[in-house]
């Protein structure tokens, strides 16, 4: 074994020793490590930089006490992992979900580092959240929780320090409560959160950004293969913002979105969703906050499959837009057997490493999350720019910036993969391009 190979093995073992049991985080690190091996072999100085990068600059865990509608005290756990400030202020979303723990937040913050780097904007990386579940909670309960959460978080954020945003179960309602509490405590109205309402500092296209951006990325990949979106049947998982606006943009580009899902099952429109039907999904999930199965009362053609995943439906393209590890190797094999041509990740790390290997063996186009779903944080960065200018850009301006950024992300990922003789391995290319920008900045800034 060469000295470089020994060093790589030593660093990898050391990471596992320091973070035992953090399965999601270690999975994310392993996926990147494999892609960066050609970089390490060509220039071993980057091995030490990577070892430093995987250790967060700061990890914050705190108690979140609040009182429910019955007058009972509740306690949840809050997190903020500030991963890297090499490229700018920490930037990344907040997730409220029962599955949230330190490992999940660290994996998300680690992925965010590469994603934010790829956008070309001046943003570091962080992620946060809580094991609080807003489902079936009243607006007052959600407000009470958000105010308690921000009462601790406000000490650690700021427009030039750390700018959180939304993620799973943190939408406009939650962002509003969090912003209001920050403003009350700090006596300061500034752009300390993105995803805000348009009337008080938000950006046009921000709710749509992750979904639209994922489709723009897929469009660029298809163009590289001399194909278009026209007529492509697309399976989508999830039914939140990412899934909704993925479907909307697919429809605008001539594709045929045919599924939405939630944790209970999926709904299929055999002939594809129309804009009117997508709007109804938005009302069910964003306003009424009910299960996707309720959609069947609206559509005579819809079919609902309890306890199933949409990956069993034959299609051309797949857009996993729900949560991490929702596609395992068995699901990937099913997609491939049903003729899937491309998988583009709207959620964070929705495919297991085994599923990704299956895609590659079958020559399936693969848009990894850190590249394909970077549209959300890209428009968050544009929202920060608008807040700094005290201006609001037009919808057309923001959408044009988003489309350009997603094209640049695809091109830089492709160029990096080709530079290291990896053909068009976009996953490896995204990891390499994202890493090198952060790593070189860390080297320039010294051992900090």
Image (cartoon, rainbow, N blue to C red):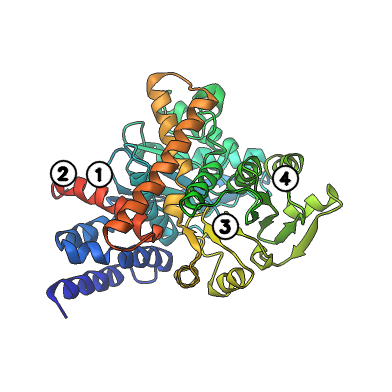
Quadrant of the rendered image containing residue 377: top left
**Secondary structure of residue under mark 2:** helix
Going 26% across and 74% down the picture, which residue do you hit?
Answer: 13
249 vs 22, nearest the viewer: 249
Quadrant of the rendered image containing residue 17: bottom left
Q: Is residue 386 visible?
A: yes
Disc number at residue 86? 1
What separation in Å lies between label 3 and label 2 (alpha carbons)?
37 Å
Pinpoint residue 279: horizontal percent, then vertical percent. 72, 39
State if disc 3 and disc 1 touch (CB < 8 Å).
no
- Name the residue that disc number 2 marks: 445
What separation in Å lies between label 4 and label 1 (alpha carbons)?
40 Å
What separation in Å lies between label 4 and label 2 (alpha carbons)?
48 Å
- Name the residue that disc number 3 marks: 320
Quarter placement of the N terminus: bottom left
Mark 1 is surrounded, within 10 Å at the Cα level, by few (under 14), some (14 to 19) or many (20 or more) other residues, namely many
- Name the residue that disc number 4 marks: 281
Pinpoint residue 264: horizontal percent, then vertical percent. 70, 62
Pinpoint residue 258: horizontal percent, then vertical percent. 70, 54
Mark 3 is surrounded, within 10 Å at the Cα level, by few (under 14), some (14 to 19) or many (20 or more) other residues, namely many
Pinpoint residue 333: horizontal percent, then vertical percent. 57, 74
């Amino acid at each position: 074994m060469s000295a470089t190979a020994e060093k790589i093995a030593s660093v990898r073992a050391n990471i596992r020793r320091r973070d035992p049991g953090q399965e999601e985080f270690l999975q994310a690190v392993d996926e990147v490590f494999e892609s960066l091996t050609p970089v390490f072999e060509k220039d071993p100085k980057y091995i030490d930089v990577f070892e430093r990068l995987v250790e967060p600059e700061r990890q914050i865990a705190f108690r979140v006490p609040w009182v429910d509608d019955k007058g009972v005290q509740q306690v949840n756990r809050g997190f903020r992992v500030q991963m890297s400030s090499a490229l700018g202020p920490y930037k990344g979303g907040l997730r409220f979900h029962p599955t949230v723990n330190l490992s999940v937040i660290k994996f998300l913050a680690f992925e965010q580092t590469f994603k934010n780097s790829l956008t070309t904007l001046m943003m570091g990386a962080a992620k946060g959240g809580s094991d609080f579940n807003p489902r079936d909670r009243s607006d007052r309960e959600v407000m009470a929780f958000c105010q308690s959460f921000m009462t601790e978080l406000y000490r650690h954020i700021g427009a030039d320090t750390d700018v959180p945003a939304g993620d799973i179960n943190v939408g406009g309602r939650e962002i509003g409560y969090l912003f209001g509490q920050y403003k009350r405590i700090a006596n300061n109205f500034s752009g300390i959160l993105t995803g805000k309402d348009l009337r008080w500092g938000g950006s046009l296209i921000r709710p749509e950004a992750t979904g639209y951006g994922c489709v723009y990325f897929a469009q660029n990949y298809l163009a590289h293969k001399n194909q278009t979106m026209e007529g492509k049947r697309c399976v989508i998982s999830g039914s939140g913002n990412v899934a909704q606006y993925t479907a909307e943009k697919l429809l605008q580009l001539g594709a045929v979105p045919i599924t939405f899902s939630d944790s209970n099952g999926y709904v299929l429109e055999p002939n594809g969703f129309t804009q009117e039907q997508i709007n109804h999904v938005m009302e069910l999930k964003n306003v009424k906050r009910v299960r996707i199965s309720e959609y069947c009362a609206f559509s005579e053609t819809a079919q609902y499959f309890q306890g199933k995943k949409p990956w069993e439906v034959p299609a051309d393209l797949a857009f996993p837009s729900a949560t991490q590890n929702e596609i395992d190797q068995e699901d990937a094999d099913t997609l491939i057997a049903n003729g899937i041509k491309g998988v583009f990740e709207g959620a964070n790390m929705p495919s297991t490493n085994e599923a990704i290997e299956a895609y590659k063996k079958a020559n399936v186009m693969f848009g990894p999350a850190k590249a394909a779903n970077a549209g959300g944080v890209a428009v968050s960065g544009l929202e920060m720019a608008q807040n700094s200018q005290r201006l609001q850009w037009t919808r057309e301006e923001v959408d044009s910036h988003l489309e350009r950024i997603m094209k640049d992300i695809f091109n830089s990922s492709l160029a990096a993969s080709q530079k290291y003789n990896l053909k068009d391995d976009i996953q490896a290319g995204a990891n390499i391009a994202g890493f090198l920008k952060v790593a070189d900045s860390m080297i320039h800034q010294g051992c900090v």
